[in-house]
Amino acid sequence: MFLPVMGAAQEAGNNQDVAVEVQAAFGKPPRVLHLEPVESLVLPQYPDAPSGLVSRVHLYVDKAHGSGENSLYLVAEMNYRGEDEDQPHIVGIFAGSRVGDGPALRLSDLDGDGMPELVLAHEAGAGAFHLRVFRISREAHAGDYRSCITASPMLKQVGCIVASLGTVAVEEGGAVVSRCYTDESRSRLMVRKYRLKKGEDEIKPEGPEEVEAAGVLKSGAGILLNTGMDKIPCIRK
């Protein structure tokens, strides 16, 4: 059984690689991962919230497989199994790599309910970028025991927007907008808006796709996270 616990994730803030031992499946020996920290966020804590909620989120990249085959590890610190203090638990593993040198995690209230969602931006290869949206659980110890990553419902993915040869942005009001070139001439952009509504667990398209003249984008592809002034810049030529 896979045990998604990381005993060394607290080192995320010091820019040091960490060696993490995880129990492998089917009785195989534990595997040691050498993870490079990318970004950490402290989540807001609310009055009267139950104990056991996620307090911090970390993003690591595993470069053990070589260039182009990196894996991203999303890690949540929480008191998940009645530990004496918050412990790090893996809640998601994704193929891909960080976007440039900028941070890849943001908090943004996409549905306007006063509670932020977690946004993860990463490169996925072949000129594609992913923007993943996660609801932060308000219920302590939520688990999916059919999955090898049992703690994943604590940060539940509710959408993944893909931008290939274009950008995807979180804009004011919580809308997620993708703008992608329609063909290799890069003369037109296909624009689609997505929105996460209160109480729903899926971010959905809002309205039809629209076409606009190119020139809006800088050369390349990338992800813009307009939650404040922070941006992840374009890195593709």
Image (cartoon, rainbow, N blue to C red):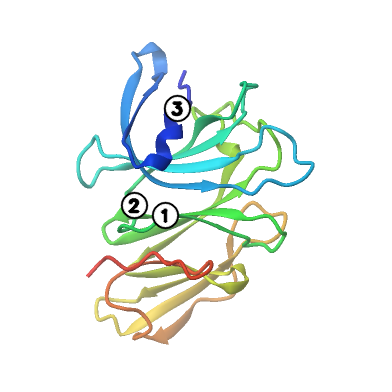
Q: From this viewpoint, which residue is outermost toward the right?
A: 48
- The amino acid pointed to by label 3 is Met
Residue 168, position as x, y percentages in the image: 44, 67
Residue 76, position as x, y percentages in the image: 53, 37
Label 2 sits on a secondary structure element that is loop
- Quadrant, the C terminus: bottom left
User: What residue is disc 2 on?
Assistant: 98
Q: Label 1 neighbourhood size at 10 Å, few (<14), some (14-19), many (20+)?
A: many
Label 1 sits on a secondary structure element that is loop
User: What residue is disc 1 on?
Assistant: 104
2 or 3: tag closer to the N-terminus: 3
Residue 33, position as x, y percentages in the image: 32, 28
Query: Is there any visible trace of residue 216 in the rendered image?
Result: yes
Residue 49 horizontal side relative to residue 182, left or right: right
Residue plotted at (77% across, 45% down) = 47
Label 3 sits on a secondary structure element that is loop
- The amino acid pointed to by label 2 is Arg
- The Cα atoms of the two marked residues, 2 and 3, are separated by 20 Å
Which residue is nearer to you in this view: 122 or 20?
A: 20
- The amino acid pointed to by label 1 is Ala
